[in-house]
Image (cartoon, rainbow, N blue to C red):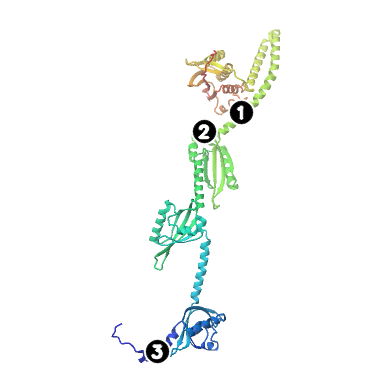
């Protein structure tokens, strides 16, 4: 202010100091009251009446009407101290009662009033309504109490840090999850328990919060007191001042160790099952209810040539069954098993066994099913082989008993015919036919006996070429009668095989007899040998006869099945058994009107011993 500016002399103006003080007293929001030395009320301002509801006249009648009864003595004691010891009371918080019966929280400032001679003549009290402030404080205390209960009883670890990341507070739950007491944890350094690989995560988090002043969520590992690592999912929240500067950090951490362990176990389980699915020979697929393939194991391509089972490749006779079974599974939600034939890209048929297993997604809405398919072609073949073996076993048992029952009357019949033959020489034709037919019956009986229980082979090393030559000489006359030429294509290398000579001759005779029967006239039968390896020799019989249709080929060798009018169906069955007993194999290929090839593979004898010729 300029020093030359004239000062207003209030004493010389119309506004007197008394009027000024009166104006201040009436305009203030604080309640002001003045009492004499005896406690009688002398003055109250309008704010007093507004705050308490009591009028000046009410106070004249009862000076302590606004003081609760339980505070009368305390109030009188305070005012006694003011009057006697000239003590000033400031910031005294108490309760006063309004005229309407409600209570109001007040902050009192009280002092004595003296006259010009310095004598105490009364007291003045200035009261400020602090009810709202007290309610706010109580609400804050109540809120703090609630949050303290929450912090002290939550499973999450709640902690606060200063700007230097020094620990300020940590909830008691830290001992539950990490094993440290509150003192041990608060006294430790920020990185003392952090996994070395996660320190950079903490540093990056702090930089991010400092830059963006936003919440950051991270996953870190802390070392438990027992030495194990605990996974924590932590959310860091910056605490800002009024001018939006970071004052401290609040960190809320949740123990997710069990979840991480479950995730790891699930991951390993998925890896194991995926490894199984991708390396198993079974065809595993996941299909939705619309038939769309969601997953298909690599085994599909390896075996089927495509990444899934195509419905169009299912055998027409089995397609309706497959549709029916899988429709039933989708409706009933029960697992099913379905066996059907499937055509590969090379046009060969295999047997597949599919197991459909329905399941639902976790929300219960999506319906899917696992389809686990297995190639059971070999199993089906083994079942058929087992069935044939069972038939052979039954036939063998029957053959043994029947053969013995037939041979006894055959011997008697043949003996009597031979005895009577000289006496009925004029009918020798009939006796010759009878003896021929008896020989044929005897031959069949001999065939049946071979089907009986396994017999011990009396094998010995024999030149293969000698056996073939003997068989050719035996059948050469029959071949000449039909103008059939038997051609032998045998090299100079002698092959020695360990065998039962008569049984092997039996096989060769059966095969060549079949060739002779298949050729009507003017045909060729070829016999050749070939070295397959150091240990095996191939004997091939081929003819240019009528041949066998493809659908009949698989049935060759079944008991009593034959393509010849007068055949018994036992010749090839017995031949298969003999070759099998010699550790060999027979394979037959044929075409209609082109002929038949029979390949016999036998092991070559490599031992030492006397060679039979």
Q: Counting residues from the N terminus, which is met first, the one under dot 2 or under dot 1? A: 2
Q: Name the residue under label 1.
A: 388
Mark carried by residue 17: 3
Packing grade of label 3 (10 A; few <14, some 14-19, many >=20) is: few
Q: In which quarter of the image is the C terminus?
A: top right
* Towards the viewer: 586 or 444: 586
Nearest to the eye among marks 2 and 1: give it: 1
Q: Counting residues from the N terminus, which is met first, the one under dot 3 or under dot 1? A: 3
Q: In which quarter of the image is the N terminus?
A: bottom left
Nearest to the eye among marks 3 and 2: give it: 3
For label 2, the SS is loop
What residue appears at the point 66 percent right and 22 percent down from the top-left corner?
Answer: 399
For label 1, the SS is helix
- Marks 2/1: CA distance? 23 Å
Extreme residue toward the left, this view? 4
For label 3, the SS is helix
Q: Tell me which corner region of the image, top left, top right, bottom left or bottom right, holds residue 508.
A: top right
Packing grade of label 2 (10 A; few <14, some 14-19, many >=20) is: few
* Towards the viewer: 446 or 553: 446
Residue 120 x %, y %: 47, 88
Mark carried by residue 348: 2
Name above or below for residue 211 compared with residue 382.
Answer: below
Name above or below for residue 359 compared with residue 470.
Answer: below
- Marks 3/1: CA distance? 136 Å
Residue 520 seen by the camera: no
Residue 558 seen by the camera: yes
Nearest to the eye among marks 3 and 1: give it: 3
């Amino acid at each position: 202010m300029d020093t030359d500016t004239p000062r207003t002399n209030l004493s010389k103006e119309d506004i007197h100091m008394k009027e000024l003080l009166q104006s201040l007293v009436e305009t203030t929001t604080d309640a002001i009251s003045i009492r004499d030395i005896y406690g009688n009320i002398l003055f109250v301002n309008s704010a007093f009446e507004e705050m308490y509801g009591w009028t000046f006249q009410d106070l004249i009648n009862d000076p302590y009407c606004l003081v609760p009864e339980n505070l009368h003595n305390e109030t009188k004691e305070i005012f006694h101290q003011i009057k006697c010891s000239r003590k000033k009371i400031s910031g005294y918080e108490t309760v006063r009662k309004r005229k309407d019966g409600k209570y109001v929280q007040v902050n009192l400032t009280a002092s004595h009033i003296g006259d010009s001679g310095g004598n105490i003549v009364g007291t003045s009290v200035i009261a400020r309504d602090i009810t709202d402030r007290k309610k706010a404080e109580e609400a804050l205390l109540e809120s703090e109490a609630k949050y303290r209960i929450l912090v002290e009883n939550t499973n999450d670890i709640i902690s606060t840090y200063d700007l230097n990341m020094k620990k300020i507070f940590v909830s008691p739950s830290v001992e539950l999850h990490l094993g440290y007491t509150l003192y041990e944890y608060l006294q430790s350094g920020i990185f003392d328990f952090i996994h070395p690989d996660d320190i950079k995560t903490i540093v990056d988090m702090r930089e991010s919060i400092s830059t963006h002043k936003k919440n950051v969520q991270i996953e870190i590992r802390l070392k438990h007191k027992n030495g194990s690592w605990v996974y924590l999912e932590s959310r860091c929240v910056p605490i800002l001042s009024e001018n939006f500067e970071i004052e401290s950090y609040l960190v809320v951490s949740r123990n997710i160790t069990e979840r991480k362990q479950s995730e790891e176990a699930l991951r390993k389980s998925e890896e194991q099952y995926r490894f199984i699915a991708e390396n198993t020979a079974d065809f595993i697929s996941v299909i939705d209810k619309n038939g769309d393939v969601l997953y298909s194991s690599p085994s599909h391509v390896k075996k089927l040539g495509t990444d899934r089972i195509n419905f169009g490749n299912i055998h027409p006779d089995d397609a309706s069954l497959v549709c029916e079974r899988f429709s039933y599974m989708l409706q009933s939600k029960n697992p099913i098993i379905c066996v059907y034939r499937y055509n590969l890209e090379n046009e060969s048929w295999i047997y597949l066994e599919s197991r459909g297993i329905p399941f639902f997604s976790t929300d219960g809405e999506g319906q899917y099913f696992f389809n686990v398919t297995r190639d059971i072609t070999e199993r089906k073949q083994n079942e058929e082989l087992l069935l044939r073996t069972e038939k052979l076993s039954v036939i063998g048992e029957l053959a043994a008993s029947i053969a013995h029952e037939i041979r006894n009357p055959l011997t008697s019949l043949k003996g009597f015919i031979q005895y009577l033959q000289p006496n009925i020489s004029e009918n020798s034709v009939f006796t010759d036919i009878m003896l021929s037919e008896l020989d044929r019956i005897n031959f069949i009986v001999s065939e049946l006996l071979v089907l009986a229980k396994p017999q011990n082979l009396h094998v010995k090393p024999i030149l293969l070429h000698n056996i073939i030559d003997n068989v050719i000489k035996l059948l050469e006359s029959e071949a000449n009668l039909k103008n059939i030429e038997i051609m032998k294509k045998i090299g100079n290398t002698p092959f020695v095989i360990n065998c039962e000579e008569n049984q092997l001759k039996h096989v060769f005779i059966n095969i060549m007899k079949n060739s002779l029967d298949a050729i009507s006239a003017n045909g060729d039968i070829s016999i050749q040998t070939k070295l397959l390896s150091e240990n095996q020799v191939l004997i091939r019989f081929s003819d240019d006869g009528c041949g066998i249709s493809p659908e009949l080929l698989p049935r060759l060798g079944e008991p009593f099945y034959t393509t010849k009018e007068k055949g018994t169906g036992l010749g090839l069955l017995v031949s298969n058994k003999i070759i099998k007993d010699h550790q060999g194999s027979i394979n037959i290929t044929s075409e209609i009107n082109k002929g038949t090839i029979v390949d016999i593979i036998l092991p070559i004898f490599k031992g030492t011993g006397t060679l039979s010729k």
